[in-house]
Image (cartoon, rainbow, N blue to C red):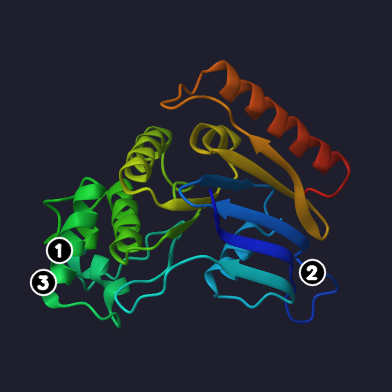
């Protein structure tokens, strides 16, 4: 497989900060791959996504993309922890937000909205208002908004972090179904190690001060996976042990 995005020696520094949030980041996401980034709060996970998305300029290094540019799509889309729905827009119009400014006809726009809502299990919810939705449904709309722009790379910043455990597991399974159906590359940030090893092909541990990629874990469990599977448990235990060691060394925060 070819890398859809590759980072070389990337660093990010906030204005006035004494040191970078992270530095010397070398990583790649292959086409169709599901990669997870984990680490303690403040390790720079969300900042890393923003750099890749082009929302924040790196202070050093280079990012290379192997993504076709077209006026009718966005190469990269981002899904946030909160769905950030506009209350004055109905569901379909919230999904349409990312399509604004793209060269798409009304019929194509409507088709993409319908397809995205179908993918997330909300085919009949286009005329609903945001306040009529549950937390899980709102997050599905946020995912649909990202899918509607037809990205090759979907960045997800703790999208299930605010949900209850049952809803969270349901959406994990839904996301795996969507990933299988669309073939999108996904880079997913979470603080939940069990979620990471259940979802990911690989898990990257970010830690230190400034943060770096401390370890790259291959999750060899076949799909579909069991959350209680031996390989999932083994990799999860290793990630947790390494993260605990970072804390003990004072570099996990």
Counting from the top left corner in percent of width and height, residue 244 is at: 77, 36
Q: Which quarter of the figure has residue 201?
A: top right
Q: Are marks 2 and 3 in contact (CB under 8 Å)?
A: no
Q: CA distance from mark 2 to mark 3?
A: 46 Å
Q: Are marks 1 and 3 in contact (CB under 8 Å)?
A: yes
Q: CA distance from mark 1 to mark 3?
A: 6 Å
Q: Which residue is mark 1?
A: 111
Indicate whether 132 appears above or below 23. above
Q: Which residue is mark 2?
A: 20
How many marks the image carries: the answer is: 3
- In-image side of 90 versus 63 (left or right): left
Q: Which residue is mark 3?
A: 107
User: Looking at the image, which residue is at 30% across and 83% down?
Assistant: 101
Q: Earlier in the sequence, mark 2 or mark 3?
A: 2
User: Looking at the image, which residue is at 64% across and 69% down?
Assistant: 63
Q: Secondary structure at mark 2?
A: loop
Q: Secondary structure at mark 3?
A: helix
Counting from the top left corner in percent of width and height, residue 110 is at: 14, 67
Q: Earlier in the sequence, mark 1 or mark 2?
A: 2
- In-image side of 40 versus 220 (left or right): right
Furthest residue to the right?
249
């Amino acid at each position: 497989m070819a890398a859809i995005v590759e980072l070389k020696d990337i660093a990010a520094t906030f204005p006035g900060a004494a040191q970078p949030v992270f530095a010397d980041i070398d990583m790649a996401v292959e086409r169709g791959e599901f990669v997870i980034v984990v680490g303690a709060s403040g390790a720079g996970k969300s900042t890393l996504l923003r750099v890749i998305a082009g929302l924040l300029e790196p202070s050093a290094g280079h990012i290379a993309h192997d993504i076709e540019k077209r006026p009718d799509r966005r190469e990269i889309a981002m899904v946030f922890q909160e769905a950030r729905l506009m209350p004055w827009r109905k569901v379909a119009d919230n999904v349409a937000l990312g399509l604004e400014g793209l060269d798409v006809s009304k019929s194509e726009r409507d088709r993409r909205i319908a397809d995205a809502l179908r993918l997330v299990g909300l085919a009949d919810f286009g005329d609903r208002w945001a306040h009529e939705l549950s937390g899980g449904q709102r997050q599905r709309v946020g995912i649909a908004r990202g899918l509607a722009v037809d990205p090759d790379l979907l960045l997800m910043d703790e999208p299930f972090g605010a949900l209850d455990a049952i809803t969270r597991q349901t959406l994990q399974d839904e996301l795996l179904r969507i990933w299988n159906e669309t073939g999108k590359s996904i880079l997913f940030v979470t603080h939940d190690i069990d979620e990471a090893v259940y979802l990911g092909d690989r898990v990257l541990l970010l830690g230190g001060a400034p943060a770096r990629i401390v370890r790259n874990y291959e999750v060899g469990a076949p799909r579909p996976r069991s959350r209680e599977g031996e390989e999932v448990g083994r990799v999860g235990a290793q990630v947790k042990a390494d993260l605990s060691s970072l804390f003990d060394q004072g570099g996990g925060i």
